[in-house]
């Protein structure tokens, strides 16, 4: 049987970088990889893969001062890259806007002779972006990330896609730090979309990140996009805890739908397909489709079913905060359905169900230091509900009834708060 061929320096360095190190010497294998790559570079100083990998090692062992010249030397192998490096190093971050940086960014192209190393060149650009991002030099980081993005958009070869996905992720983080939430959300969505290119190798945090994105879209009243994010999560094999979180976000979607329908708020037409690799059977319910109590009740039932699924995992014993948040959503479910109900007595019954849903909270014993702020929210809400019930009970009633019953109604609402605080 023939012996296996010896690994080259790049493959051996990658093997060392993936090895688990002892806690007392966490960088021992990385230092071995560093020494191996430096020796290889002495023999091949123009190797782009060696510079790219060595830059990764320097950043991993927290030596950015050594990583920067290494990465810049690797980039300088590309003809014309001196202009980009000089432009980035000469920037004054506090005096440049992203618009001006985009307009002034030097052209960057790679010759055909370097086609085989486009992915490594993109990786060097990403690493330089990370280096400057960690130094809070967001303008320089932006220039390197945008250059990497342009490289892929100009020549989107399959081997470049994984590196491009990293570029999108870094841009999403950068825009978030620059207080540009719309841009950050766009790049987050693109990152999630490209991570689905290989459905057999989806990142572990994909569902969590997609749910966070759905929450952003909900806050922006972009319900079609939020719906796509939530239903996409159900298609990638979520864990039980993730299934419960998906159900909780789905309930929020339905609650927001009822709210917009109640106030006749129309959605901006949106036909974007966020995740073309995923097919879901769920039909989006638009607020404009809810024009009666029956239609509203159908959405209400969907929300309550989703909340029941979430509560079956996030039980009170072990998930106090999550469980109380779900009870608050359940109360909001009733609150958003009530405006569609014309009958006063049924309105009162639904308000009473809101109070009843908090029974285990109102009569339970909790650590006030840990959960006091949550309990205050619940008690204030219950007090408000009792106030609403008071208004509904005394309407159209005689003065004697009002004089004998108002005090007792209001007392019921305030007692639970006073007992705790």
Image (cartoon, grey):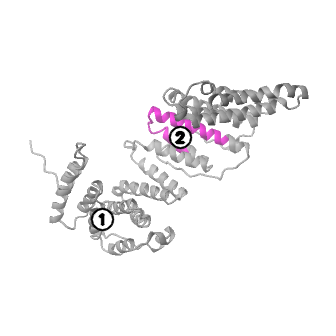
How far from the left and from the top, in percent, is residue 180?
53, 59
Q: In which quarter of the image is residue 139?
A: bottom left
- Helix, strand or loop at mark 1: helix
Viewer-nearest of discs 1 and 2 = 1
The quadrant of the picture occupied by the C terminus is top right
The correct choice, above or below, for 90 with respect to 267 in the image is below
Helix, strand or loop for the magenta stretch, by majority: helix
- Helix, strand or loop at mark 2: helix
Q: Which residue is more in the foreground, 136 or 248?
A: 136
**Count of marks overlaid on the render:** 2
Magenta residues span 228-257
How far from the left and from the top, in percent, is residue 159?
33, 56
Q: Quadrant of residue 344?
A: top right
The correct choice, above or below, for 231 with respect to 126 in the image is above
How far from the left and from the top, in percent, is residue 246?
52, 37
Q: Name the residue under label 1.
A: 68
Q: Is residue 9 magenta?
A: no
Q: Which residue is more in the foreground, 157 or 66?
A: 66
Of the two numbered discs 1 and 2 on the same chain, state the one appearing first in sequence.
1
Q: In this view, does 408 lie to the left or right of 284?
A: right
Q: In this view, does 64 lie to the left or right of 145?
A: left
**For the residue carrying disc 2, how many other residues have a C-alpha within 10 Å: few (<14), some (14-19), or many (20+)?**
many
Q: Is residue 255 magenta?
A: yes
How far from the left and from the top, in percent, is residue 414?
71, 30
The correct choice, above or below, for 201 with respect to 186 in the image is above
Residue at position x 24%, y 59% in the image = 54
Say if residue 102 shows up in the picture.
no
Q: Mark 2 points at which residue?
A: 231
The quadrant of the picture occupied by the N terminus is top left
Label placed on residue 27: none
């Amino acid at each position: 049987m023939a012996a296996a061929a010896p690994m080259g320096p790049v493959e051996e360095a990658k093997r060392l970088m993936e090895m688990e190190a002892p806690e007392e010497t966490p960088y021992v294998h990385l230092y071995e990889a560093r020494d191996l790559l430096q020796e290889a570079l002495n023999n091949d100083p123009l190797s782009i893969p060696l510079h790219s990998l060595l830059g990764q090692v320097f950043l991993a062992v927290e030596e950015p001062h050594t990583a920067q010249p290494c990465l810049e030397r690797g980039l300088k192998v590309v003809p014309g890259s001196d202009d980009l490096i000089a432009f980035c190093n000469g920037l004054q971050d506090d005096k440049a806007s992203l618009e001006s940086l985009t307009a002034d960014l030097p052209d960057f192209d790679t010759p055909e002779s370097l086609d085989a190393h486009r992915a490594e060149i993109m990786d060097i650009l990403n690493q330089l972006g990370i280096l400057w991002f960690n130094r809070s030099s967001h303008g320089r980081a932006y220039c390197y990330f945008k250059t990497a993005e342009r490289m892929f958009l100009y020549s989107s070869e399959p081997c470049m896609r994984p590196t491009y996905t990293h570029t999108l992720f870094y841009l999403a983080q950068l825009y978030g730090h620059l207080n540009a939430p719309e841009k950050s959300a766009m790049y987050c969505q693109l990152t999630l979309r490209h991570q689905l290119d290989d459905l057999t190798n989806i990142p572990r945090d994909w569902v969590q990140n997609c749910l966070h994105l759905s929450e952003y879209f909900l806050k922006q009243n972009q319900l079609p996009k939020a719906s796509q994010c939530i239903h996409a999560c159900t298609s990638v094999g979520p864990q039980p805890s993730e299934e419960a979180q998906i159900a909780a976000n789905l309930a929020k979607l339905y609650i927001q739908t009822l709210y917009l329908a109640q106030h006749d708020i129309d959605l901006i037409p949106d036909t974007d397909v966020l995740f073309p690799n995923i097919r879901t059977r769920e039909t989006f319910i638009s607020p404009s489709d809810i024009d009666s109590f029956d239609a509203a009740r159908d959405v209400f039932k969907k929300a309550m079913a989703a909340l029941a699924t979430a509560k079956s995992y996030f039980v009170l014993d072990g998930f106090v905060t999550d469980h109380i948040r779900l009870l608050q959503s359940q109360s909001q479910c009733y609150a958003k359905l009530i405006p569609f109900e014309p009958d006063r007595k049924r309105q009162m019954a639904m308000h009473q169900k809101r109070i009843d849903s908090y029974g285990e909270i109102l009569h339970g014993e909790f650590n006030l230091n840990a959960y006091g702020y949550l309990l205050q929210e619940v008690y204030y809400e219950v007090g408000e509900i009792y106030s609403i019930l008071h208004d509904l009970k005394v309407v159209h009633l005689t003065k004697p009834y009002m004089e004998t019953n108002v005090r007792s109604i209001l007392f019921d609402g305030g007692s639970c708060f006073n007992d705790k605080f």
